[in-house]
Image: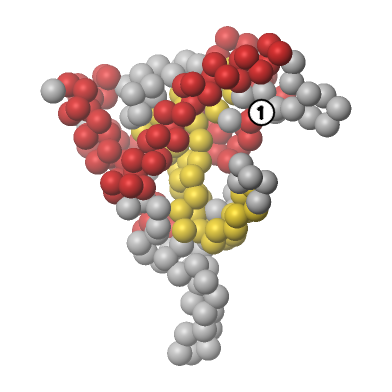
Amino acid sequence: MSWKNTEQNSFADSIIVSLGSINIIDATVIEAKQSRKRRGKDGNNTQDSETAYNVKVAADGKKKTTYGFKMHANTDEDGFVKNMTYTPGNLHDSQEFNKLLDCKKTKDKLKTGGEVYADSAYANQKNDKKLGKQNNKVLHRAYRNKPLTEQQKQDNKQCSSIRYIVERTFGLLKQHHGLGGARYLGLERNKARAQLIAISHNLKTGMNIFK
């Protein structure tokens, strides 16, 4: 079952109408149920075979390795999960960019249905061309011998004040719904669980807004 079908069959019309027009994109790592290499009674490795290692550099510069999955999400300004995908943990965030936006092709660029906020992992010439100047709110990336200009730093600061919403949403999904760790073995079962968690979060968010 796709996220779209799940969403359409589960939301009240009033909540669907309330979805915002901006797109805030990010991904979060979810540790696999069996993340360590262990041998079962038959001598085989009991690690979940449908996932992979994710390596992330923390703010302190240290690398953190997690064996698990990734939930990629597109939220609006109120924290509603508009779209999501679920992949092995080693897939680069930018690979799910088009799927999350549900882009519609036009003659010269992709129509994304509003501004797109994302961190610098999504910054590349291909995405710049897709979004166009008006909708592109992806954080600027500094390169060797090409530091950010003062204007780019200011742009990043402004965009980050909105982009935090998707990070807050991931925090809520993990803190209140147990998304931080996979419950089952295999990608599809954990994906279905993540979809149900996102729906539950959206319904709760909608009730808080409309009450």
Residue 62 appears left or right of 26: right
Q: Residue at x 74, y 27 (%)?
A: 142
Q: Quadrant of residue 190?
A: bottom left
Residue 196 visible? The answer is no
Local SS, label 1: loop
The amino acid type, in three-letter code, at marker 1 is Ala
Furthest residue in direction front, as rendered: 60
- The image position of residue 49, as x and y in percent, is 52, 68
Nearer-the-camera pick, 66 or 11? 66
Q: Quadrant of residue 59?
A: top right
Furthest residue in direction left, as rendered: 211
Above or below 137: residue 184: below
- The image position of residue 45, as x and y in percent, is 54, 79
Q: Residue at x 47, y 58 (%)?
A: 31
Q: Residue at x 40, y 34 (%)?
A: 168
Colour scheme: secondary structure
